Image: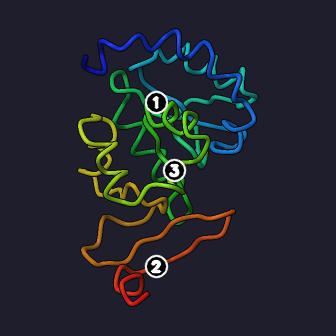
Amino acid sequence: MVASDFPWEPVLDHLSSNAVVCRGILGGVVASQGNGPYDEHSFDEFLGACGIEAIYVNESDAPVIVLGREGWDPDDLDAAVEARRGGTLKVYSQEMIVAALAIGQDLFDVCDEDELLALGKGHPALEYLLEQGFEWPTTRSSSPRKHDSSSQSTFHGEEIFWSLADARRG
């Protein structure tokens, strides 16, 4: 069974029972755009049922974006990344939200970079952002990708910079 064959809609109907977990992962405001696996309107209604305000990506400087596989606009994504330049921005696929609710934790907290890249592989919007130089899956919206071993993530609102060399030294 491929992802498109999975009956996603019945799952969405029940995910809002994890509203507290969802708000803990995503916060109170999320920019949302695109369809797949869920219709954008249905996904935004789910966010609302969780107590999260869903706003348009093109009108946003929200710290979190959730993207569907189709129906997203490259210009809107570029503008959203630019609006958060120098700050933090977490970008999820709709599927990543389902996975995070299944395990009850933010995937950015429990997965390493290789695992997050695997989750984004084949997702047109996430791959677009990577091609444009957004350093996904890190959460810092900065200049185009630099080829070094440094990364950054956010933990309880604090930006944490780390280096793979430092991690290896242990």
- In terms of sequence position, does the residue under pointer 2 or pointer 3 come before the other? 3
Q: Position of residue 47 (x, y in %)?
A: 65, 25
| Mark 3 residue crowding within 10 angstroms, few (<14) / some (14–19) / many (20+) | many
- Could you tell me how far apart the alpha carbons at marks 3 and 1 are, in whole angstroms? 13 Å
Answer left or right for 162 relative to 143.
right
Element type at marker 2?
strand
Horizontal side, residue 38 vs residue 115: left or right? right
User: Would you say the residues marked 2 and 3 are in contact, meaning their CB atoms lie under 8 Å apart?
Assistant: no
Quadrant of the rendering where the N terminus is positioned: top left
Identify which residue is drawn at 30% across, 12% down.
Answer: 5
Measure the alpha-carbon separation of dots 2 and 3.
17 Å
- What's under tag 3, amino acid-wise? Lys
Distance Cα–Cα, label 1 vs label 2: 28 Å
Q: Amino acid at mark 1?
A: Gln
User: Residue 94, which numbered label?
Assistant: 1
Question: Quick one: label 2, few (<14), some, or many (20+) residues within 10 Å?
Answer: few
In the picture, the disc for residue 162 is: 2
Task: Please state if 150 lies on the left or on the right of 140 as rendered.
Answer: left
Q: Are marks 1 and 2 in contact (CB under 8 Å)?
A: no
Of callouts 1 and 2, the N-terminal one: 1
| SS at circle 3 | strand
- Kindly indicate the quadrant of the structure image that contains residue 155: bottom right
Q: Residue at x 49, y 10 (%)?
A: 9
> What residue is disc 3 on?
90
Give neighbour class at mark 1: few <14, some 14-19, many 20+ (Cα, 10 Å): many
